[in-house]
Amino acid sequence: MTAGPAPGAGGALLIVGDVVTDVVARHRTPLAAATDTAASIRTLPGGAGANAACWAVRSGHRDVRLLGRVGADAAGWHERALAGAGVRPLLVTDPEAPTATVIALVDAEAERTFLTDGGAVLRLCPDDWSAGLLDGVAALHLSGYLFFAEPSRTAARLALRAARAAGVPVSVDPASAGFLAELGPERFLAAVEGVSLLLPNADEARLLTGAADPEAAARELSRRVPLAVVTLGAAGALVAEAGRVTARVAAPPVEPERRVDSTGAGDAFTGAFLAARLAGADPVRAAEAGCAAGAEAVTVVGGRPPSV
């Protein structure tokens, strides 16, 4: 099993994941219970899978495809936003459920708290998948949100098995410590068995392994998958293979006054990391590219690259 996308493999990056309408509310003062809190509020296209796809294009990969499920309420808007970012949208319109919606509460330190309505995302089903989606694909990435409910978990597992059978490496971003704790680490690890690359943040890595220290968690995860890359926010990232941490990558510093919103910083890391690997970078260089994209992401509101 290869450790993530084969360096310089060429071909498309296919992401199967979530397309979300984000309502980003930035409040400079603490939330005031039972009354008003002043905020700057914007409605933006988002979703971990969709964001990562946009950042992969931003990072230089020109053939990025996204399979996801949306509601009829916002299907056209999301398709135009993805196409405008250079992503090839492969969106399934759900006839019943609305598009997933996330309310992101962003405080004065740019840290965010999410209120999530999964909507159509979690209704992605096996019928939405076909083996032809892998034509010309060099790497498959699955958003972890798909694994937290049925039928999207079954659809994600189907895509994973099909990719492995075709010799296409698969990566997964666990996506949410809260949902991961609710599902259970062992159930999640069983569901993603066979992946080549895991991209958790430190909280997710600790949950998946029970290790308090991110380095210990990275080492443990790399015993279960060929490559584990644990993001540490402003502290950078850890690269681990075969039971040992092979590199600790620093993140570019971002001045506090430039940090406006941490929404999508992990998605930016994922997209840039995968793009770099497909362009020929080793895991350390790919992690450096991911850290640079994550640092840029916190300077813009929402989860997409600037001007997207």
Image (cartoon, helix red, strand yellow):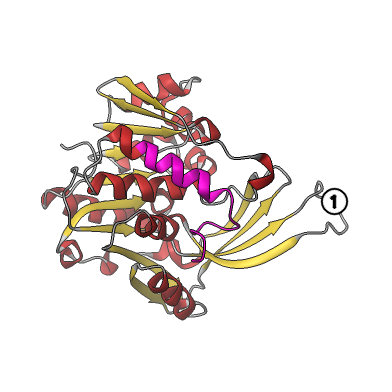
Above or below 184: residue 26: below
Does residue 280 appear left or right of residue 155 in this picture? left
Does residue 305 appear left or right of residue 103 in this picture? left
Above or below 287: residue 61: below
Residue 120 or residue 81, whichever sits in front: 81
At 86% from the left and 59% from the top, the residue drawn is: 36
Residue 243 or residue 110, whichever sits in front: 110
Residue 61 or residue 147, whichever sits in front: 61
Q: Position of residue 35 (x, y in %)?
A: 88, 57
Q: Position of residue 39 (x, y in %)?
A: 77, 59
**Regarding mark 1 in the picture, which secondary structure is present there?**
loop
Above or below 53: residue 78: below
Residue at the right extreme of this rendering: 35
What residue did someone put label 1 on? 33
Residue 67 or residue 148, whichever sits in front: 67
Does residue 192 appear left or right of residue 148 in this picture? left
* Whether residue 175 can be seen here: no
At 18% from the left and 43% from the top, the residue drawn is: 6
Above or below 61: residue 100: below
Q: Position of residue 283 (x, y in %)?
A: 29, 35
Q: Which residues are magenta?
A: 287-308
Does residue 305 show up magenta in the picture? yes
Does residue 190 show up magenta in the picture? no
